Amino acid sequence: MSGRVKGARPGEAEPVERVAVEVDRLCWTGILLGLAFTMTNVQQFAAAGARPWSLRWCGAWLLDPMVSLVLLAILRAEQVTARYGVRTGGWVRAAKWFTLGSTYVMNTWEAFAEHSPALVVLHSVPPLVVFVAAEAVTDLRDKLGEAVSVAFMNAPEATRRTSFSDYLAVARAAYEPGTTVTPAWVREVTGCSRGLSSRLAAELRGEKGARP
């Protein structure tokens, strides 16, 4: 694995896992804020000057959530499938690009109609940030997972004090879809004790939904 940091301590694995959770939360918070910003623009586009609180004005608020929820579902599913190396079909990619394109067009239509470069930029940034952030967070999670493994495996054997979280991080990194998670398998991939392997196997099965 390229880019490994030599001499990392095993205790660093748990902080890296916390960083991974924080990064995931921050990215998805930004995505949700971006979609909230686009919702107001799409509502104005759909309402087309309708009287506030009229049926058309109220119905216009439903358009952006309809598209955004489908887009979020696709992006979240792709995060999981990409993590396990599963390729999605053409319809999934088409749905993602169609929902993203729809959001972008509805956000920027009036800006292009007014020939205002400033408004085009303003209304282009949020939907593009949503898409780029959703794509990037998948890669970030994978790389941070690798960092957990590196932090543990590169520690000097003589100074290694392995915690439950350290062993669990190594087992997570070794797990592949379809793996039968047993105490024996855990001992094989982590080198932990027999007594600890049962706890680790139960914890990992609970996380992954793996069979015993």
Image (cartoon, rainbow, N blue to C red):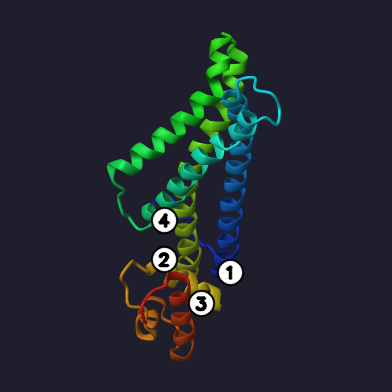
Horizontal and vertical percent position of residue 32: 60, 43
Query: Which residue is identified by label 4?
Result: 80
Q: Image quarter for residue 181?
A: bottom left
Q: Secondary structure at mark 1?
A: helix
Comparing marks 4 and 1, which lies closer to the viewer? 4
Looking at the image, which residue sits at the far top?
A: 115
Return the disc, 4 or 2, that comes first in the chain's sequence: 4
Q: Image quarter for residue 1?
A: bottom left
Give 12 or 84, whichever is nearer the viewer: 84
Q: Is residue 4 above or below residue 30?
A: below
Q: Amino acid at mark 3?
A: Ala
Q: Determine whether label 2 and label 1 are within 8 Å by CB.
A: no
Residue at the image point whose x is 39% and y is 85% from the top: 183
Q: Amino acid at mark 2?
A: Ala
Query: Which residue is identified by label 2?
Result: 173
Q: Is residue 56 above or below residue 197?
A: above
Return the disc, 2 or 3, that comes first in the chain's sequence: 3
- Per the rendering, the mark at residue 11 is 1
Q: How far apart are labels 3 and 1 at the CA level? A: 14 Å
Q: How far apart are labels 2 and 1 at the CA level? A: 16 Å
Left or right of residue 5, residue 51 in this image: right
Give 71 or 145, whichever is nearer the viewer: 71
Q: How far apart are labels 4 and 3 at the CA level? A: 37 Å
Horizontal and vertical percent position of residue 64: 55, 35
Comparing marks 2 and 1, which lies closer to the viewer? 2
Q: How far apart are labels 4 and 2 at the CA level? A: 15 Å
Q: Determine whether label 4 and label 2 are within 8 Å by CB.
A: no
